[in-house]
Image (tube, rainbow, N blue to C red):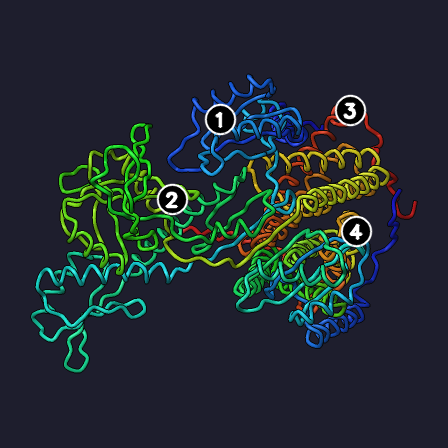
Amino acid sequence: MNRYPLWKNLSILFVLIVGLLYTLPNFFGEVPAVQVSSSRSTVKVDEAVEARVLQTLTAAKITYTGTVRDDSGLRIRFTDDKTQLQAKDLIEKTLNPVPDDTSYVVALNLLSASPSWLSSLGAHPMYLGLDLRGGVHFLLQVDMKGALTKQLDATSSDLRTSLREKKIYNSGVTRDDLTLTIRFSEAAMRDQARIVVHDAHPELTLADRAEGTDLLLVATLAPAEQTRIQEEAVKQNIITLHNRVNELGVAEPVIQQQGPDRIVVQLPGVQDVGKAKDLIGRTATLEVRMVQESADLGGAAPAGSDSFPEIRNGAAFPTYVKKQVVLTGDRFVGATASFDNNHSPAVSIRLDAAGGRIMRQVTRENIKKRMAIILFEKNKGEVISDATIQSEFGSQFEITGQFSTEETNRLAILIRSGALAAPMDIIEERTIGPSLGAENIKKGFDSTLWGFIAIAAFMCIYYRLFGVISTLALAANLLLLVAVLSLLQATLTLPGIAAIALTLGMAIDANVLINERIREELRNGVSPQAAIDTGYSRAIGTIIDSNVTTLIAGGALLAFGSGPVRGFAIVHVLGILTSMFSAILVSRMITNFVYGRRRKLDTLAIGQVWKPGV
Amino acid sequence: MEFFRIHKDIPFMKRALLFNVISLITFMLAVFFLFSRGLHLSVEFTGGTVMEVAYKEAPQLDPIRQALDKGGYTDSLVQNFGTSLDVMIRVPNRAHETSTQVSANVMNLISAASGVKPDLRRTEFVGPQVGKELAEDGSMALLVVICGIMIYLAIRFEWRFAVAAIIANLHDVVIILGFFACFQWEFSLPVLAAVLAVLGYSVNESVVVFDRVRESFRNSRMRSFTVPQILDHAITSTISRTIITHGCTQMMVLSMLFFGGATLHFFALALTIGICFGIYSSVLVASPLVMWLGVSREQFIKPVVKKEEAVV
């Protein structure tokens, strides 16, 4: 008897139902929406903003069908494009009353139209790649050596200062490529220096060398330290890129690290490549200036000074700073949240060599005066730190005050976001028009559909009922594949759609193997029930063997492929896995359902079984 | 309906030499074209800028080519893409010029040449370092696939099967590349993916045959069969499945060729060639190779372990 135990049938049905649930969102299509997100790191989209937006919309009698607010911002759904555009203009006016001074990004977006109970189950439609929805793609190469030299320049300036302070006489600190060399004429000085350098910079590996009459102390960065600096640099560049892309008003930008030294930036829907590139390539937006002390208490800004707001507890206080810029963001090497000598939260800042020199001179002349750090976003400055200079310092200093650790973390991020840690180059760029994207979806869909119909028609004619079962199994495979892709939110590209089609074409192999085996058993005179059983059990070994080789190829593509090849490989590998489930278990379940209970079974509807010599 | 009504096992092995000579000649031709013409690599591998523009009316391509030549973009490639309204322009990388400048310059030049400003549908810029890496990664992937499949087959079957399957299927890969070199079709990343997918796919063809070979060797009723007869039997009894499976896959691939548009064209083409030669080589080349490598029944029948009991 060909029967599956109840638990097996139920498990298969359960998998299929879950598959259906996660495939469903793809059928609902998309509805127009307006997305509000913060364009500046100091502004948050919170309940107050949501209430304000909704109030304005209600007042203007614009109907919305739903709102979603999460970390990425606020999204409001509308019924059609027209209301979406109206609402966007209105929200833009409400949130950003002054056109040049925008705190919020208001962008048009499309949201899945699937009902909210599906979304709450985590069922979302497949994530479409740029070639299917249109947009810009950049691949940026971070200059990793640049990150190291920048750091070493800062260290060499540090060393110069500390050696001078400790009165250790030397004939200069120089950086050559990735090594720092300190020259001495006396061995005693070098011995002292070694201790000083080691204490101040334990990350440096020190070695002695002689060159003519000079005694040298050669310092290099340990490999682990180099890796750390480079990782930090990439992370910081990503943060900076995020801030800049925010200004473009893109609904769902993707900024990701790819490999150790590359960053992918994808901006769906953006067509103006020039503007996007300008923004991404822009340099530092941080300035250090001295505070104009005499004019602290309101009134117009005195001559030779600018006024920038400082936000404290949600209120803006104007701060007057001198027009003369002490330092810009490109002199900043790093900013981290730390603790000062009294164990209260502080922000440690490192400048590069030139920055350190300037800072030393300025601080020496301005002790007990106030210095401000101003962050520029969208050409609009904001004072993020206003602190009194306690003593002379160089390339390394701390900002202390009544900070909480949360505040110091935020401040460190703000300072870092003003500067790129290492230079970047665009090494790959792709633009896809939106019409081309829609066309690609249609073409990919059509190929899969017609291919599926052709295979289904052939199978049904050639294998009759078993062909219908095979087709159902193939449909289950497609269902599960789409469900897994939706569940994983893997990016679907045109090669990915091609992989769906190809995988379906290959997956039918398993059913052909099974059906041929059953026919062969029948030809050898085995009874129908036994033929089904042996057919399946004999074919399984072959199916697994043949899928393993395909999986090896898919796995290699996944490991070494990039871009379109990866998109292809992910779908291909997942498709092979789902096909084993559907071809073996689902088709067997249906076969059992049809034939399993019949005690008297004379023939199977598997098409003509020809016997030689009959 | 049943297509294959075969009375006796077809004596494939008698013609083994012929099949191998045919595939050797095809292989040599492919190698010849690969060396004489080389692959027409896409911009992903060579670096450069590709632009796809759409015109309202079919443009003359020659004025566009001349305009680009005059503008200093020598070695550029201008061709129709899909329809006569769509034009693909490919220009190599030039130092001191950013990708934005290239696309702006080219748009100006071609607008001036044809008098109308076409619609820019897609641009793609690839820096020189990316192309080199892609070529390296591609070779690496190929190597891993070959080693992985050989190890698997050697463990699952026998080293002779592994060697035969890999030789047969690598020659497919070379033949696909040969076609691309001969007709100067564009070899892009999706085509590379197709080639590797075909490698995994047509090896599974050999696996199905080998599975039968092993089963037949172990079958006590076939003890009197010689090795060539066993191979003939295995191929004959799987040929129906082979042709139906590949036919189905080919239907899907043809659907991509017809409906998938220009982007999927070469991808589908590579698969078509791969599937056709895959059937041929994995059945008619791999099996004779196994025979010549000296496969025998003893390799599959585990010797009965004698009980060695002793009482001391």
In the image, residue B160 sits, relative to residue B239, either above or below, namely below
Q: Which residue is drawn at the image coordinates 62% and 59% (left, top)?
A: B103
Circles 1 and 3, Cβ within 8 Å, touching? The answer is no
User: B199 or A359: nearer the eye?
Assistant: A359
Which dot, 2 or 1, sits closer to the camera? 2
Discs 1, 4: same chain: no
Q: How far, Cα to Cα, is label 1 from label 4?
A: 44 Å
Indicate the amino acid at tag 2.
Answer: Phe
Question: In this view of the protein, which residue sits in the foreground, A15 or A218?
Answer: A218
Q: Quadrant of residue B190?
A: bottom right
Q: Which residue is mark 4?
A: B56
Q: Label 3's element?
A: loop
Q: Is residue A565 left or right of residue A304?
A: right
* Snapshot quadrant of residue A394: bottom left
**Chain of the residue under label 1:** A
Task: Identify the disc placed on residue A599.
Answer: 3
Q: Quadrant of the N terminus of chain A?
A: top right
| Numbered disc 1: secondary structure | strand
* Residue depicted at x 72% and y 62%: B112
Residue denoted by label 1:
A69
Q: Chain of mark 2?
A: A
Disc 4, SS: loop
Disc 3 sits on a residue from what chain? Answer: A
Whether labels 2 and 1 belong to a single chain: the reply is: yes
Q: CA distance from mark 2 to mark 3?
A: 82 Å
Mark 1, Cα crowd under 10 Å, few <14 / some 14-19 / many 20+, is some
Q: Which of the two marks, 1 or 4, is nearer to us in this view?
A: 4
Under tag 2, what secondary structure?
A: strand
Q: Amino acid at mark 1?
A: Arg
